[in-house]
């Protein structure tokens, strides 16, 4: 593909996803959106009836499934159409309407949980004995009953559902500020020409071999956030306060407890993660020391963290080649897995190339009843090949869950969402390491693997620790100012990066550019998921078919039919123990030693 960004209509049809598999036409989407709104209104007739008879309860739960299925289709299609080309006003309107449908549906369903909680437990037990069809919803009801002390009256629940727009206001305001309003100063390249720094090119600028360009870009970005620091602090602390409000209203001891309770995740999992990563920080510090020596600098600065210390080979990875490499790397997963993944990559599932106004990045998404989809912006690089493997991991997780679970339990929770994707990446890494004969490429792969650990396990854990600290301080009544938040973030960087890193003042403001902080206690799951994925990939490669069968049957096919901790445990990885995290970080330790041996010793 050319470096020129094409218009969507200029891209070959075979490189575009087939959203018509979800809705054959936009008119059918419009019809279903309107029908979903009507279904939401009609659902009100079940209010006050759930305790009257098992027939009423079963019918309401069935209609709830139907309604949630429709709203998922409506919301997903509208946003995926918009992501193809965000400048299309028609799909901007579709996405706005989908938001309204989502809000109306949430409000319509808000009475279900509190009303089920009013049913006498003996009566509920009798319902299960009377009607075998209710067994399908036993887990749904058990989860609701587990949340009894955190569920309020029907009236309050309805009010809380209607406050969604208020609750997401800080996130929306921050998103508008960070994506539309903030502008960074230009910098100069080696020839003195202006470079406009943007969110889109910042990462690339930090990878530039010219250290002055890296430094300029770094200062350009964070000097801008510093100028807007009081505003961002106000937005951020408002978000902390709204989270604290909901935790109190729902009778949770903390915001963290509230968010981990959604998946019945013990808080000890969060603590184990931070404690275990702290134990392995000496290896992280050693890696930074190696980076410093390989770059040949007297001082290692935060703007030196992303520049490659091993150059990627000039080899190109066009999508057609990337597909074949990924297919080959997934061979340990068995014939069925590879067959389905291959069909998905070859047609219908994947939107491959960048086009004008296409959403940046990559993701996998979809709605029950239709195959999953993958959005890419493939760049013919090795990194893009890893991205393909990653997103196909998500897609295959969705495929198996949808195939083996009713829509009630097909969606998997965020805690396990990154496991299948990262496991695919680990299998790709293993394949490439075993099949390269080029020393330069081998060292690049080792460094790529180390960077995966640094950016996912270490960095996301640092983010998680920052979240934990600031939420705790707010709950204690501490006054969080820009200065205090920057001090917390600065000290964490000192802890995580070690003595060979100069912690520049500018990095103190980095917390201001992390959008994930507006989804509380989310980022830790990247680190736990990464750890679980490393454990699964090791089992798959060492134990073969038995481990694969267990992984697919107990985990990939499980959806949300069990708590995520139990799904992982059934498949062979116990995340309630720090062992999986420790094992993953031991791999990091080994790769750091290998990297030192194969690079520094040959310098």
Image: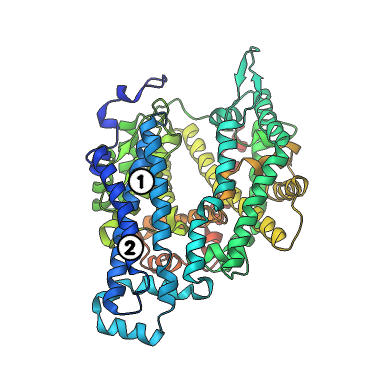
Give the label on residue 76, or none: 1
Is 582 left, or right, of 230 in this rendering?
left
- Whether residue 333 is visible here, answered yes or no, is no
Q: CA distance from mark 2 to mark 1?
A: 22 Å
For marks 2 and 1 on the same chain, the one whose residue lies earlier in the sequence: 2
Residue 192 visible in image: yes
Q: Please say if 76 is above or below 599.
A: below
**Direction from residue 241 to residue 406 in the image, left or right:** left
Element carrying mark 2: helix
- Residue located 32% across and 72% down the image: 137
Can you say which quadrant of the picture contains the N terminus? top left
Height in image: 484 above or below 468? above
Identify the residue shown where x is 62% and y is 16%: 194
Q: Nearer the viewer, mark 2 or mark 1?
A: 2
Mark 1 surroundings: few (<14), some (14-19) or many (≥20) residues within 10 A: some
Quadrant for the C terminus in the image: top right
Residue 495, percent from left and from top: 71, 51
Tag 1 secondary structure: helix
Q: Position of residue 547 (x, y in %)?
A: 35, 62
């Amino acid at each position: 593909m050319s470096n020129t960004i094409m218009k969507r209509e200029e891209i070959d049809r075979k490189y575009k996803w087939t959203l018509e598999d979800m809705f054959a036409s936009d008119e059918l989407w419009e019809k279903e959106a309107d029908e979903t709104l009507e279904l939401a209104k009609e659902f009100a007739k079940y209010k006050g009836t759930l305790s009257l008879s098992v027939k009423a309860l079963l019918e309401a739960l069935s209609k709830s499934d139907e309604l949630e299925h429709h709203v998922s289709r409506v919301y997903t299609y509208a946003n995926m159409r918009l992501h193809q080309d965000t400048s299309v006003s028609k799909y901007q309107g579709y996405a706005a309407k989908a938001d309204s449908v989502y809000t109306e549906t949430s409000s319509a369903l808000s009475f279900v949980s509190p009303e089920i909680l009013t049913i006498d437990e003996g009566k509920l037990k009798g319902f299960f004995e009377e009607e075998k069809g209710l067994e399908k919803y036993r887990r749904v009801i058990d989860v609701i009953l587990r949340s009894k002390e955190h569920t309020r009256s029907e009236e309050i629940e309805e009010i809380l559902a209607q406050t969604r727009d208020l609750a997401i206001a800080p996130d929306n305001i921050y998103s508008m500020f960070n994506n539309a309003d903030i502008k960074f100063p230009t910098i100069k390249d080696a020839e003195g020409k202006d470079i406009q720094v943007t969110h889109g090119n910042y990462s690339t600028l930090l990878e530039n071999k010219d250290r002055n360009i890296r430094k300029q870009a770094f200062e350009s970005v964070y000097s801008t956030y510093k100028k807007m620091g009081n505003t961002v602090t106000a937005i951020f602390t408002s978000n902390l306060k709204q989270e604290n409000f909901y935790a109190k209203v729902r009778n949770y001891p903390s915001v963290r407890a509230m968010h981990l309770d959604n998946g019945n995740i013990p808080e000890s999992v969060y603590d184990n993660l931070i404690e275990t990563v702290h134990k392995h920080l000496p290896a992280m510090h050693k890696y930074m020391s190696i980076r410093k020596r390989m770059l040949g600098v007297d001082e290692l600065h935060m703007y030196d963290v992303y520049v490659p210390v091993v150059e990627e080979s000039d080899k190109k990875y066009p999508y057609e080649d990337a597909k074949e490499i990924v297919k080959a790397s997934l061979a340990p997963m068995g014939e069925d897995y590879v067959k389905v993944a291959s069909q998905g990559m070859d047609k219908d599932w994947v939107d491959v190339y960048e086009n004008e106004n296409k959403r940046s990045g990559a993701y996998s998404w979809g709605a029950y009843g239709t195959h999953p989809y993958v959005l890419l912006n493939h760049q013919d690089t090795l990194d893009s090949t890893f991205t393909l493997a990653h997103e196909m991991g998500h897609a295959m997780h969705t495929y198996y869950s949808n195939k083996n679970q009713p829509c009630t339990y097909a969606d998997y929770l965020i805690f396990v969402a990154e496991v299948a994707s990262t496991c695919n990446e680990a299998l790709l890494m293993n394949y490439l390491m075993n099949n390269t004969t080029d020393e330069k490429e081998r060292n690049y792969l080792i460094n790529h693997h180390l960077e995966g650990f640094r950016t996912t396990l270490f960095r996301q854990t640092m983010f998680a620790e920052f979240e934990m600290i600031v939420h705790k301080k707010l709950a204690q009544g501490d006054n969080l100012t820009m200065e205090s938040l920057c001090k917390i973030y600065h000290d964490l960087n000192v802890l995580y990066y070690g003595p060979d890193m100069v912690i520049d003042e500018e990095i103190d403001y980095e917390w201001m550019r992390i959008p994930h902080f507006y989804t509380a206690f989310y980022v830790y799951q990247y680190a736990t998921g990464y750890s679980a994925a490393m454990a699964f990939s090791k089992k798959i490669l060492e134990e073969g078919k038995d481990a694969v069968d267990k992984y697919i049957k107990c985990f990939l096919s499980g959806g949300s039919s069990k708590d995520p901790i139990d799904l992982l445990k059934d498949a062979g990885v116990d995340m309630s123990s720090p062992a999986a995290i420790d094992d993953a970080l031991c791999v990091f330790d080994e790769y750091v030693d290998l990297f030192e041996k194969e690079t520094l010793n040959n310098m």
